[in-house]
Image: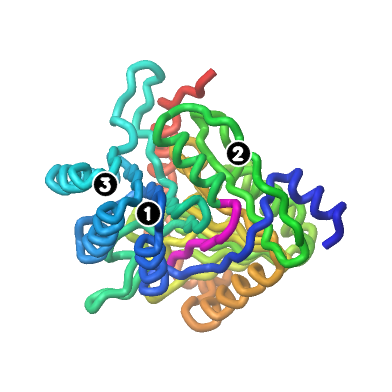
Amino acid sequence: MDLHDAVTITRQGYIANDAARLVRAGYEYFQLLQQLIREARHTIHLQTYIFEEDETGKEVIEDLLDAAARGVKIYIIIDGYASQNFSDDLVERLQSAGIYFRFFAAYFKSKNFYFGRRMHHKIFVADGKRSLVGGINIGNHYNDTAENVAWLDWAAYVEGPLGLLLQQICERRLRNETFTRIVLPPVPDLSTRIFVRPRINDWVRRKREISLSYVEMLREAKSHITMVSSYFIPGNILKRYIADAARRGVKIRIIQTGISDVSIAKYAERYMYNWFLRNGVELYEYQPKVLHAKLATYDGKWVTVGSYNLNNISAYASVELNLDILNENFAKDAEARLQRIIDNECIQITPEYFRKKQTLWEHYLQRSAYDIFRLLLFLFTFYFKQRD
């Protein structure tokens, strides 16, 4: 990479980092998360949507308490709706150990009338250097246990200056105030670095960076795109860009779940299958377990991974965080993983297969679910007021 390319990339918000790799939900992810907690020396920031008090959650809690006992400053925020079963006794135990803990957002807020706004991102940062960002919550559904195989999901693990920016993002959420931008140190050798940028969607704060990343991908792709998404119900703007890319000859593949934890969402997704197939998009349904992942890659050079679902709740009603990773080795590894999943764990939804499965009753259920789901999306987004 020459200096001109490096300058262009950094102007687009990318930061040169030392290392990055894709981490799958399950034993791999939680082994790494617990290792990072155990090795932290100064600070830990943990912000997540769901934090269960099951076996997985309890193991993470014990590691956090051990870290606090050795003097690590720990800051935790979890979503007040999705984690509403997090017990008062456990909150008191964490706070008694010196851990800063709070829930994100009340159900209503009078000044701007935020109805149901959710903190859906999943961030972990240790010592401002080692980071995990993805779609993986803390609970048995996302872990491999004696009784359970993890849902399909991913996170990106990054070592390097990105951690400082993610720590700043956590602090902004923690204190609800604006921080001056951190000045990152110069990186002497750009040729061996992995370029990563954090992308935020928070419509209330006028942030729609992840939405724009997907638009950029669909506009810039020359060869192929693979998208993996749960609750995949894109709005009209994104559908237009998907259709435009397909008309340019870009091969587009979408991997969705065959087994959903939200039945109405699966019916609503299937209502859109006919549109995708008419526009030349290849559709695949993941079979073994629930697919909870949110990842996309194109042309063997770029990946986005995080908490952002391709629907209007993520676009307008939730706080989301993705990482865009510009690196051929990272992208090719992601593509190889997705190809193995397509080959071994998915069924392809061809036009013939879809017609065979599609009865009038199924079509009615799917259309009804789609209309209801769109109405719910509208109700979620209608009550939000952007800040001036």
Residue annotated with mark 3: 83
Alpha-carbon span between mark 1 and mark 3: 31 Å
Give the quarter of the image for residue 136.
bottom left
Q: CA distance from mark 1 to mark 2?
A: 51 Å
Q: Position of residue 156 (x, y in %)?
A: 52, 62
Q: Secondary structure at mark 1?
A: helix
Which quarter of the rendering shows the N terminus? bottom right
Up/down of 53 relative to 354, above or below: above
Residue occupied by mark 2: 182
Identify the colour scheme used. rainbow
Residue count near mark 2 (Cα–Cα under 10 Å), binned few <14, some 14–19, many ≥20? few
Viewer-nearest of discs 1 and 2: 2
Q: Could you tell whether 73 is left or right of 1 in the image?
A: left
Q: Which residue is mark 1?
A: 365
Q: Are marks 1 and 3 in contact (CB under 8 Å)?
A: no
In primary-sequence order, the first of circles 1 and 2 is: 2
Range shown magenta: 152-162
Tell us which disc is closer to us: 1 or 3: 3
